Amino acid sequence: MRLTRIVTVLLCITVSAPIRLSGWSDEQHTLQGTVVDSHGAVVARASVSAMQVDGMSNAGELNWVTTDELGQFRLIVHKRGGYVVRAKKEADGYPDPTFLLCADSAAKFPEVQVHDANIADLVVALGAKGGTLLGAVVDDSGQAVPHVTVKIEDADGPSAFVELTADEKGRFRFVVPPKPLRISATASGYRPTLFQGGERIRLAEGEQREVVVRMDK
């Protein structure tokens, strides 16, 4: 009986031991700063993330935090190394900079090296505002094509693009940068389709535009 109790206790200790993910560290380093727009005005309720980049330029998992009413943020990272601090506010037309399509040379995203000390007084500057693209994909009878793949690409550099999956009603939404774009759609059982035959479209700052992509079988 005594031996049985000892074995039971040991098993309980083993099961309750914490599980650590690969690369996780108990270290905590704080990154603090302010998000501003292109004119230097603070941006409240913006989303901020620190993306870790290793020697192979691979990004780690992103964790977004929200700035306060003064545009200030506080991020905690658990690894040492290099980070780039980025921000977005899609509700106000600032595209998500994690997509190559939305890269903006006017944005100022500081790169930092995290060692033993915390880092403060960072300034993250958003780039140009874009517009909100609202779309629907339908067949030749006007019925929705659900879960279709929609591609939005830079008309001047098609290697920069995003692919979205439309919902069950064939609808999609994306905040796009202020540059010429092309839209296409692909779906099983339908011919690949270029919106308006591949015509370039461009949304102005703050513009909200609805488009309809029609697909034929």
Image (cartoon, rainbow, N blue to C red):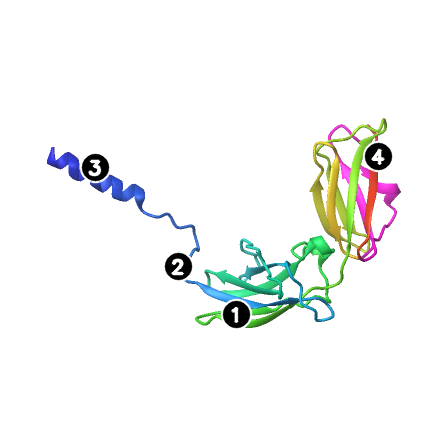
Tell me which residue sits at (83%, 56%) in the image: 204
Q: Position of residue 59 (x, y in %)?
A: 57, 56
Q: Position of residue 121 (x, y in %)?
A: 57, 73
Can you tell which quarter of the image residue 173 is in?
A: top right
Tell me which residue sits at (70%, 69%) in the image: 41
Label 3, on which residue? 8
Q: Is residue 186 magenta?
A: yes
Real-space CA distance between mark 2 and mark 4, rounded to the nearest whole angstrom = 52 Å
Can you tell which quarter of the image residue 71 is in?
A: bottom right
Q: Is residue 2 magenta?
A: no
Can you tell which quarter of the image residue 27 is in?
A: bottom left
Q: Quadrant of the C terminus?
A: top right
Earlier-in-chain disc, 1 versus 2: 2
Q: Amino acid at mark 3?
A: Thr
Label 1, on which residue? 113
Earlier-in-chain disc, 1 versus 4: 1
Tell me whether the residue at label 4 lies in contact with that at label 3, contact meaning CB atoms closer than 8 angstroms: no
Q: Position of residue 10 (x, y in %)?
A: 22, 42
Q: Amino acid at mark 1?
A: Gln
Real-space CA distance between mark 4 and mark 3, rounded to the nearest whole angstrom = 65 Å
Q: Which mark is residue 26?
A: 2
Earlier-in-chain disc, 4 versus 3: 3
Q: Amino acid at mark 2?
A: Asp
Q: Is residue 156 above or below residue 38?
A: above
